Image (tube, grey):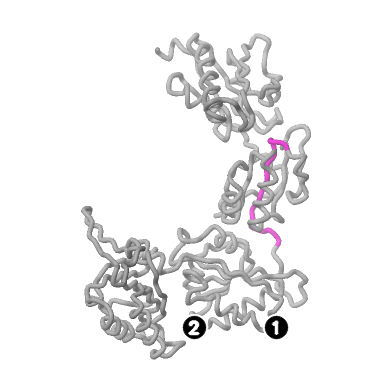
C-alpha cells in the first residue's frame, strides 16, 4: 500500500501535565489530526486527554485505548505480559483501520512518547507500515528538576533513570553507583524504593516530586514522605552532587565522619563494584597512593590527598584524622583492600584509643589473583594459597617455609609482589624451591597489568618461568599437580584446576 493512500501516524508528546508546556508542534499536530487516540485505565479517565483537552474538537474521532489490567494480577493464560501484548496488538489494529482509510492518527502521550510511554508499543507495531512522526515532549524528569530548582546533572556527572519496578537489590546497587538519579513508577513500589535509597546510603540526598506541573503537585524530602500517599505519577530524585554542601574539616565539627577503605580492583572503572563506586563519589576526601588515586574520576568539591606507596601507616592516620573532624574519607586501594593492601594499615591505626570512635568500613574489590585467573580460565578452581614474595615486611625464611608447606600440600599458589626494581632474586628462588615439589611442566599463569592498557597474560611452564620478565605489576598463578593446560581448537590456551581431587 502506498503512502499516498494511507494516513499518517503521530506520537504526540504532551509534556508533564501543564497544558502550557505542550510544544507548538504538538498543538499543531492535534489540530491537523483526524483521530485522537489515548490510553486509559478501566475507569476511563485519561491524563493524556485531560492535558490536551482544550485542543480536542467535537469533530475529532476519539479512540480510547483502555488497558485490560494495570497491575500484574490477571487471569490471562499468558499472565500480565500476555494480556498486555494482546491488548497492544488489538489497539494497533484499531488504529491501522483509520490509517488504512487515509485518516491521520495522533496518539497522545504524557511526557515524551519514547520515554517509558505507552505510545512506543503502537510505534513498534505500526511505524514500519505507515508514515510516522514522533513529537518529543518535556519529560517528568525535567519537570521534577525544574520544580525542585536543583541541577539534575552537571559536568561529567552520570544521570541514571530507573524504574521503581526493578528488584530492590538492583535499585540499591545502581543508586550506590551513580552520581545523580531519578526513580520513576513509584506508587506501590515506593516502600522498596525507599529501602533501596536507605541501603545505598543516599536517602538523605533524595527528594520527592509528585505530579510535577499538574494540579495536586507536591514536593519534599523522600525520607519524610508517607508511603500510603504516593501515587504512580511521582518520582524520586537524587540531584547533582556538584556544589552540594560538604563539611569543612575543623577540630570542633559535630558531624561524625567515617573512613571507607575502597578496593578499586586491578585496573580502571570496569573493575569497580557499584558499592565502591558509590563510596568514592560520596567521599569528601580521597586518600591513597597516587597511582590508585589516578583511577578515580576528579569531582568538583572533593579533596584528593596522594602519597608515596611506602607510607601506609601515615596515610591511614591522616585519613582517620580527617574523619575524626567530620569528613567522609575514602582510602583508595588497588585490588581488594584486605589482600596485601590498605585495609590492614587503616585498621591497625584505627585500633588506637584516639580513633576508637571513628567508623571504619572495608569494601571489597576484585583481586589481582581473581582477575588473572579469569583471563586464563579457572586455575583457582580448587584449593589455593596466597603468598606475597615481598621480603620488605617479613624475612625470606618465612616466605620459603610457607612456600614449601603450600607446595607439599599440593595447593595452587597465587604469588603476589614477585619482583621490583630492588627485589630481583625472589622469583628465581621461589621457582627453584617449587621445582623440588612440582613437575617442570606445571602450568604457570603470568599476569601483567591485568585490566590495564599493557595487559599481558601468558601461560608458561614452571621450568620456563623467567624471573627477568616479572615486575611489581605481575601476579603468578602456579598450578597444582592436577592443574590442566590445553590449547583449544580456536587457538586459545586455557588453564583450569579440577574441583575433584583424586582418591589417595
Residue 472 in view: yes
- Image location of residue 125, percent across then percent down: 47, 23
User: What is the tally of numbered marks visible in this picture?
Assistant: 2
Q: Are marks 1 and 2 in contact (CB under 8 Å)?
A: no
Magenta stretch, main secondary structure class: loop
If the image is split into quadrants, where does the N terminus sit? Answer: top left
Q: Where does label 1 land, which residue?
A: 354
Observer-nearest residue: 136 or 262?
262
Residue at 25% x, 70% y: name it.
460
Mark 2 secondary-structure assignment? loop
Residue at 46% x, 61% y: name it.
271
- Image location of residue 181, percent across then percent down: 61, 49
Q: Where does label 2 land, which residue?
A: 310
Observer-nearest residue: 381 or 230?
381
Res 27 → quadrant: top right
Up/down of 383 relative to 51, above or below:
below
Measure how far apart labels 1 and 2 are at the Cα level.
Answer: 23 Å
Up/down of 11 relative to 154, above or below:
above
Question: For the magenta stretch, what is the residue range?
Answer: 231-245
Residue at 55% x, 22% y: name it.
87
Q: Is residue 415 left or right of residue 161?
A: left
Q: Earlier in the sequence, mark 1 or mark 2?
A: 2
Say if the magenta span includes residue 106: no
Which of pointers 1 and 2 indicates the residue nearer the eye? 1
Up/down of 121 relative to 265, above or below:
above
- Image location of residue 141, percent across then percent down: 64, 41
Amino acid at each position: 500500500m502506498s503512502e499516498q493512500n494511507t494516513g499518517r501516524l503521530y506520537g504526540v508528546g504532551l509534556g508533564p501535565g501543564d497544558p502550557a508546556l505542550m510544544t507548538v508542534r504538538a498543538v499543531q499536530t492535534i489540530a491537523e489530526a483526524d483521530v485522537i487516540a489515548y490510553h486509559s485505565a478501566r475507569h476511563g479517565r485519561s491524563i493524556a486527554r485531560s492535558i490536551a483537552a482544550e485542543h480536542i474538537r467535537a469533530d475529532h474521532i476519539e479512540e480510547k485505548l483502555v488497558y485490560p489490567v494495570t497491575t500484574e494480577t490477571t487471569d490471562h493464560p499468558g499472565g500480565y505480559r500476555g494480556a498486555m501484548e494482546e491488548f497492544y496488538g488489538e489497539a494497533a489494529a484499531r488504529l491501522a483501520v483509520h490509517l488504512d482509510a487515509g485518516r491521520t492518527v495522533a496518539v497522545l502521550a504524557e511526557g515524551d512518547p519514547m520515554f517509558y510511554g505507552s505510545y512506543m508499543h503502537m510505534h513498534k507495531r505500526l511505524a514500519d507500515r505507515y508514515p510516522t512522526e514522533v513529537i518529543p515532549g518535556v519529560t517528568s524528569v525535567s519537570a521534577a528538576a525544574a520544580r525542585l530548582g536543583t541541577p539534575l546533572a552537571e559536568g561529567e556527572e552520570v544521570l541514571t533513570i530507573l524504574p521503581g519496578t526493578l528488584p530492590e537489590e538492583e535499585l540499591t546497587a545502581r543508586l550506590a553507583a551513580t552520581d545523580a538519579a531519578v526513580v520513576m513508577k513509584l506508587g506501590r513500589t515506593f516502600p522498596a524504593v525507599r529501602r533501596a535509597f536507605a541501603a545505598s546510603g543516599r536517602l538523605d540526598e533524595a527528594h520527592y516530586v509528585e505530579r510535577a506541573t499538574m494540579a495536586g503537585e507536591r514536593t519534599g524530602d523522600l525520607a519524610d514522605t508517607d508511603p500510603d500517599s504516593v501515587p504512580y505519577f511521582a518520582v524520586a530524585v537524587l540531584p547533582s552532587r556538584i556544589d552540594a554542601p560538604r563539611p569543612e574539616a575543623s577540630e570542633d565539627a559535630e558531624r561524625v565522619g567515617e573512613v571507607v577503605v575502597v578496593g578499586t580492583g586491578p585496573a580502571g572503572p570496569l573493575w569497580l563494584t557499584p558499592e565502591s563506586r558509590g563510596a568514592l563519589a560520596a567521599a569528601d576526601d580521597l586518600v591513597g597512593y597516587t597511582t590508585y588515586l589516578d583511577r578515580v574520576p576528579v569531582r568538583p568539591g572533593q579533596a584528593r590527598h596522594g602519597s608515596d606507596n611506602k607510607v601506609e601507616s601515615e596515610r591511614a592516620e591522616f585519613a582517620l584524622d580527617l574523619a575524626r573532624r567530620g569528613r567522609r574519607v575514602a582510602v583508595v586501594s588497588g585490588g581488594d583492600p584486605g589482600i596485601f593492601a590498605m585495609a590492614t594499615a587503616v585498621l591497625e591505626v584505627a585500633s588506637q584509643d584516639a580513633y576508637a570512635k571513628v567508623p571504619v568500613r572495608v569494601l571489597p574489590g576484585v583481586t589481582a589473583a581473581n582477575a588473572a585467573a579469569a583471563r586464563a580460565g579457572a586455575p583457582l578452581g580448587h584449593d589455593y594459597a596466597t603468598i606475597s614474595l615481598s621480603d620488605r615486611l617479613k624475612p625470606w625464611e618465612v616466605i620459603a617455609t610457607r612456600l614449601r608447606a603450600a607446595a607439599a600440600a599440593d595447593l595452587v599458589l597465587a604469588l603476589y609482589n614477585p619482583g621490583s626494581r630492588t627485589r630481583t632474586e625472589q622469583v628465581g628462588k621461589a621457582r627453584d624451591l617449587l621445582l623440588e615439589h612440582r613437575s617442570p611442566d606445571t602450568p604457570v599463569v603470568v599476569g601483567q597489568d591485568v585490566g590495564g592498557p599493557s595487559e599481558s597474560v601468558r601461560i608458561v611452564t614452571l621450568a620456563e618461568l623467567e624471573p627477568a620478565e616479572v615486575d611489581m605489576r605481575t601476579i603468578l598463578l602456579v598450578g597444582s599437580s592436577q592443574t590442566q593446560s590445553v590449547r583449544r581448537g580456536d587457538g586459545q590456551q586455557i588453564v583450569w584446576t579440577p574441583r575433584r581431587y583424586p582418591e589417595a
